[in-house]
Image: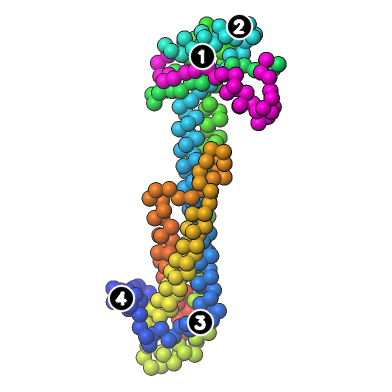
Amino acid sequence: MSITRKDLRRIVLGDRQADRVVPPTGFTAQLTLFAAGAMAFLAVFAMALSLASGRLAARWGDELARSSTIRIVAPLDQRAAQTEAALRILETTAGVAFARALSDEEQQDLLAPWFGADLDLQTLPVPRLIEVIEEDSGFDAAGLRLRLAAEVPGAVLDDHSRWRAPLVQAANRLKLLGWLSAGLLGLTIAAMITLAANAALAANAQVIAVLRLVGATDRYIAQAFIRRFTLRAFGGAVVGSVLAMTAVLLLPAASDTGGFLTGLGFQGWHWFLPFTIPVLAGAVAFLATGAAAGRALKRLA
């Protein structure tokens, strides 16, 4: 059943006589409102998770891609000399923006979560760490390894590639999972509204038969159901989206100590995205009800 511009105007503006065909209250109304509201609430959180995962993947990728570490694994009496030699090599390496050796206090802070704050580095063969920050163009890791092997035998270059790829891949999969969840929620809304529309049509079979006797067309009857269920889905999704956005506002803000467990909200223009959920819910209800009404009216003919 195709929808003309005149039909859309009637659906938007409504028809008092046609609206009487659909029960204004009852199980189907409550089911549609609850399903649309609940699915919209969950869709907002799925969207927030997906966007936060995308930001996390970008941050991990940028931070790890532009940083490297050199470990100086040498006897204690040679460690300082080899560290200075490695820093001199880095100063003349194209693509290296900044390099520095971590202090004992910084290395102790890195090991504190595992060995405690009272760890004495002199009692453990802990290598000296050199932090390397790359330029946007990057540096030749293979060439740097060859220079270090020739001049600093205790130096080991770690360009973080083996750490970066799994982390970015995991974050991207979380992002994809969030969008897939939002899509499944949309299909669930369509299924619930289809069931509710079929129930309403079946419950009003006698009323539909009388309307046909007095000259009402199937198009006219279907439009009444489409309008009522579209408005119900839109209204329920508005309530669910507003409640979800309020809950997202109450989530903890992003912080370094909280890690991935914080910063799950929206940022910048992404706050406008949840407002599309009621519109999409109304569109899904429009299509699902139209299809269900067409099938049901043919069955009741």
* Residue 219 image offset from top left, x and y in percent: 37, 80
Badge 2 marks a residue whose secondary structure is helix
Q: Residue furthest front?
A: 118
Q: Amino acid at mark 2?
A: Gln
Badge 3 marks a residue whose secondary structure is loop
What residue do we see at 42% from left, 72% from top?
A: 230
Give the residue number, with chain letter if any, for mark 3.
Answer: 25
First reached walking from the N terminus: tag 3 or tag 1: 3
First reached walking from the N terminus: tag 1 or tag 4: 4
Q: Which numbered disc, 4 or 3, marks the residue closer to the eye?
A: 3
First reached walking from the N terminus: tag 4 or tag 2: 4
Up the image or down, 85 lies above or below 128; here it is above
Badge 4 marks a residue whose secondary structure is helix
Q: CA distance from mark 4 to mark 3?
A: 24 Å
**Which label belongs to residue 268?**
none
Badge 1 marks a residue whose secondary structure is helix
Up the image or down, 117 lies above or below 122; here it is below
* Residue 258 image offset from top left, x and y in percent: 57, 41
Q: Amino acid at mark 1?
A: Arg
**Which label belongs to residue 9?**
4
Q: Amino acid at mark 4?
A: Arg
Q: Nearer the viewer, residue 8 or 33?
A: 33
Residue 127 on the magenta span = no
- In what quadrant of the picture does the N terminus appear? bottom left
Q: CA distance from mark 4 to mark 2?
A: 84 Å
Give the residue number, with chain letter if any, for mark 1.
Answer: 145
| Residues shaded magenta | 93-122
